[in-house]
Image: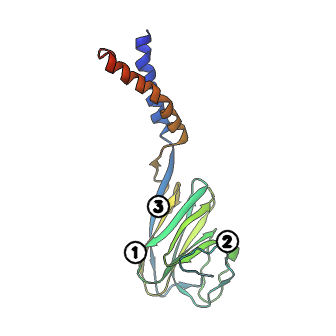
């Protein structure tokens, strides 16, 4: 009976670990967008290069081409946003709630809703976002028309028609179970080595 229970317990241990591996905690969303030289908006200041601003005091007096979109995250935590595919001057902002673009006057969006912004590179490496809150990414370009891509990474991201693209990751529970299983596996391996006829 003991000989029968041993492989059952051993197998159950690894099955449980596989089940605990199922929760997902990481994903990425890539969003393609277009911008047009005739469609402009003013954007928040300051607009630093190489660092990320988190407090904004005014709007630019000149309007620039832009692209924008809304997104949500599935879990509260740290995320990153980056712009690619655009040559020349480009920057990115993250805004809580909607953004109302305006080329002729200051946008009505409250400046306190602007959470982060930067340029050169147009990358926000770390920003804490809350699950269930609507956010807007705003990309501003120095001139011209074209297209680019915004990549949002961190947890589960919902953008447009994209819901979540889960990537399996090791959870603390699965690591704990695997750690507890190691003695069983090591003991079984040693027994098989000492007595080749054992299961």
Q: Please, what secondary structure does the residue beneath circle 1 have?
A: loop
Label 3 or label 1, whichever comes before in sequence order:
3
Seen in the picture, residue 1 relative to 10 is either above or below; the reply is above
The image position of residue 170, as x and y in percent, is 48, 43
In the displayed image of the protein, which residue is found farthest to the front? Answer: 194
Earlier in the chain: of badge 3 and badge 2, it is 3
* Residue behind mark 1: 85
Nearest the eye: 13 or 39: 13
Q: Which residue is mark 3?
A: 29
Is 103 in front, or is 178? 178
Q: Residue at x 45, y 30 (%)?
A: 182
Relative to 173, does residue 69 appear above or below in the rendering? below
- What is the x, y in percent for residue 176? 53, 35
Residue that carries the numbered disc 2 in the rendered image: 113
Q: Are marks 1 and 2 in contact (CB under 8 Å)?
A: no
Residue at (61% x, 61% y) in the render? 128
**Are dots 3 and 1 in contact, CB under 8 Å?**
no
Where is residue 63? Give x, y as percent: 56, 88
Of the 4 image quadrants, the one containing the C terminus is top left
Quick check: 155 above or below 85?
A: above
Q: Residue at x 49, y 52 (%)?
A: 26
Judging from the image, what secondary structure is the residue with disc 2 in? helix
Seen as rendered, the residue at the extreme top is: 1
Residue 110 in sight from this viewpoint: no
Q: Secondary structure at mark 3?
A: strand
Structural crowding at the residue carrying mark 2, measured as other residues with C-alpha within 10 Å and reported as few (<14), some (14–19) or many (≥20): some
**Image location (x, y in percent) of residue 192:** 33, 20
Badge 1 crowding class, 10 Å Cα cut-off, few under 14, some 14 to 19, many 20 or more, is few
């Amino acid at each position: 009976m003991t000989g029968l229970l041993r492989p059952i317990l051993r197998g159950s241990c690894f099955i449980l670990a596989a089940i605990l591996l199922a929760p997902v905690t990481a994903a990425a969303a890539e969003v393609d967008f277009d911008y047009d030289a005739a469609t402009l908006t003013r954007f928040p200041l300051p607009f630093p290069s190489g660092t990320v601003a988190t407090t904004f005091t005014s709007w630019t007096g000149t309007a620039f081409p832009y692209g924008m979109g809304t997104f949500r995250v599935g879990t509260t935590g740290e995320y990153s946003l980056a712009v690619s595919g655009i040559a020349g001057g480009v920057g990115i902002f993250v805004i809580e709630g909607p953004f109302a673009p305006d080329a002729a006057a200051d946008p009505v969006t409250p400046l306190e809703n602007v959470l982060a912004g930067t340029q050169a590179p147009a990358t926000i490496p770390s920003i804490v976002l809350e699950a269930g809150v609507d956010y807007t990414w705003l990309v501003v370009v120095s001139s011209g028309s074209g297209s680019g891509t915004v990549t949002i990474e961190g947890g589960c991201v919902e953008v447009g028609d994209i819901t979540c693209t889960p990537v399996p990751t090791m959870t603390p529970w699965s690591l704990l179970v695997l750690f507890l299983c190691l003695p069983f596996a090591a003991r079984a391996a040693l027994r098989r080595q000492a007595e080749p006829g054992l299961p």
